[in-house]
């Protein structure tokens, strides 16, 4: 049996047997540029004699073709083979029995650090010395978490996903995660999460895999993902780790659904509502078409207007709000008169649902605006709203002036 640092002199009449499961690399010292065949027999015990090897054509061997460099050094990476493939190794020779293999050197694998069975993310103590957010604007954004937090090999990560605000360290200290964002706790390689206990206020999380009762999750998974139903404020997370076994589940990321479209393929109001209810792809910018059925408010601070659209321009059926929307190309609106009931529009933005309202998030933009026709007046003329002139003009032989 070869140990770490042992050197064996190669002899053409003798094979060397070694259990290689504890080694990461085989180094062969031989003649410069010599081509060799390394063969492993994984059905012979490491203590048996070389003469007990199965025949070379039995299918019980792993063959490797290697070539020494100009200094006569050839290396084999042993980490890619399972333990059963590494029970035995025969001293390698070139195909034509030319040249001599002088030495074999085995490099022992680095010891794997032990993973504690209990790992604590003491957020209130803030050992990461993360900046704490507070208030609003830049001081709030200062607490945004942009990198995973890792304690003893356990990873705590965050994804803004469909939330309006990313996870943040906040004055307390605490971590705040927001509705429709994601938080994941993952065990180190070869380990599983079996229990997670939260110390938190305003708590509201759903877990995948399931297993969350009150503020404690229990199961057997390589990772656990949480989605908040409301703003959740966490001061401590205690994670129990165990060895991965046959019952451990290994959730994999699901390929995200994309719903982005174009102005030419703009969704109807009904389709936009359907997509929001499905809850997928809501981080994609989309286009929705409709007829303005109600104009709510001009927001002076942002020079924006909140208005509603529907399929037919009435308020009888499904409606969709363009909340705090901007003009074409994101331009400011001047007044509430800049949009009119009856106008046919295409609007682009991010879909969301606020309480019971289906809507575009703030800063959605008009893409096209077709002004409504003025109803027939008693003078027998039709009036058309001219966006450039910002007034209704009578349609006739002499294009109207007022």
Image: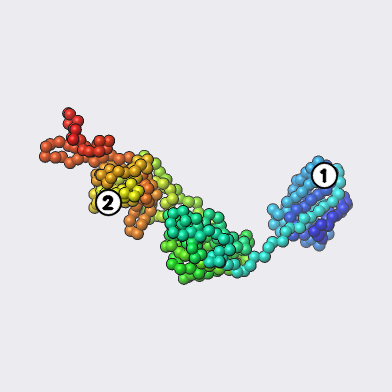
Q: Earlier in the sequence, mark 2 or mark 1?
A: 1
**Residue 168, which numbered label?**
none
Q: Image check: 171 left or right of 55? A: left
Q: Quadrant of the C terminus?
A: top left
Query: Residue 229: percent from the left, percent from the top?
Result: 42, 62
In the image, residue 123 above or below residue 357: below
Please give the name of the residue rendered at 46% of the width and 60% of the height, measured from the top-left corner. 134
Q: Quadrant of the N terminus?
A: bottom right
Q: Badges 2 and 1: C-beta atoms under 8 Å apart?
A: no
**Front position in the image: 9 or 59:** 9
Question: Tag 1's secondary structure?
Answer: loop
Question: Tag 2's secondary structure?
Answer: strand
Please give the name of the residue rendered at 46% of the width and 71% of the height, measured from the top-left corner. 214
**Looking at the image, can residue 227 be seen?**
no
Mark 2, Cα crowd under 10 Å, few <14 / some 14-19 / many 20+, is some
Please give the name of the residue rendered at 79% of the width and 42% of the height, measured from the top-left corner. 69
Query: Residue 374: percent from the left, percent from the top?
Result: 19, 40
**Looking at the image, can residue 255 be seen?**
yes
**Front position in the image: 385 or 338:** 338
**Front position in the image: 368 or 11:** 368
**Front position in the image: 219 or 231:** 231
How is this picture coloured? Answer: rainbow
In the image, residue 76 above or below residue 329: below
Q: How many marks?
A: 2
Q: Quick one: which residue is furthest to the left in this view?
A: 378
Instruction: Tell me the residue that label 2 is attached to.
Output: 296
Instruction: Tell me the residue that label 1 is attached to.
Output: 72
Mark 2, mark 1: which one is toward the viewer?
A: 2
Mark 1, Cα crowd under 10 Å, few <14 / some 14-19 / many 20+, is some
Please give the name of the residue rendered at 50% of the width and 51% of the height, measured from the top-left corner. 255
Q: Quadrant of residue 162?
A: bottom left
């Amino acid at each position: 049996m070869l140990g770490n640092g042992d050197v064996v002199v190669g002899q053409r009449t003798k094979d060397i047997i070694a259990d290689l499961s504890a080694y990461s690399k085989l180094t062969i010292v031989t003649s410069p540029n010599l081509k060799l065949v390394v063969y492993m027999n994984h059905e012979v015990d490491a203590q048996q004699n070389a003469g007990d090897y199965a025949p070379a054509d039995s299918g019980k061997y792993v063959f490797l073709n290697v070539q020494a460099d100009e200094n006569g050094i050839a290396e084999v990476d042993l980490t890619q083979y399972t333990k059963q493939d590494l029970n035995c190794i025969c001293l390698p020779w070139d195909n034509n029995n030319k040249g001599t293999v002088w030495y074999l050197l085995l490099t022992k694998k680095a010891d794997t650090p032990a993973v504690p069975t209990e790992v604590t993310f003491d957020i209130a103590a803030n050992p990461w010395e993360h900046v704490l957010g507070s208030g609003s604007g830049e001081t709030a954004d200062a607490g945004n978490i942009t990198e995973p937090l890792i304690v003893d090999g356990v990873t705590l990560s965050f994804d803004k996903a469909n939330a309006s605000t990313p996870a943040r360290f906040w004055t307390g200290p605490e971590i705040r995660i927001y509705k429709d964002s994601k938080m994941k706790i993952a065990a180190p390689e070869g380990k599983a999460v079996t229990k997670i206990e939260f110390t938190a206020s305003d708590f509201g999380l759903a877990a995948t895999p399931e297993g969350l009762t009150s503020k404690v999750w229990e199961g057997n998974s390589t990772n656990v993902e949480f989605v908040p139903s409301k703003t959740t404020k966490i001061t401590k997370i205690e994670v129990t780790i165990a060895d991965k076994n046959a019952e451990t589940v290994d959730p994999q990321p699901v390929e995200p659904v994309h719903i982005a479209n174009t102005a030419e393929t703009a969704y109807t109001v009904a389709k936009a509502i359907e997509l929001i209810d499905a809850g997928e792809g809501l981080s994609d910018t989309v286009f929705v078409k409709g007829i303005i059925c109600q104009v709510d408010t001009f927001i002076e601070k942002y020079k924006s207007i909140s208005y509603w659209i529907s399929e037919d321009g009435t308020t009888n059926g499904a409606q969709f709000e363009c909340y705090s929307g901007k003009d074409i190309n994101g331009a400011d609106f001047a007044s509430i008169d800049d949009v009119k009931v009856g106008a046919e529009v295409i609007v682009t933005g991010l879909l969301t649902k606020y309480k019971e309202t289906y809507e575009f998030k703030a800063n959605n933009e008009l893409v096209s605006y077709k002004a409504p026709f003025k109803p027939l007046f008693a003078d027998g003329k039709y009036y058309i709203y001219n966006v450039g002139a910002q007034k209704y003009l009578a349609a006739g032989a002499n294009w109207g002036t007022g």
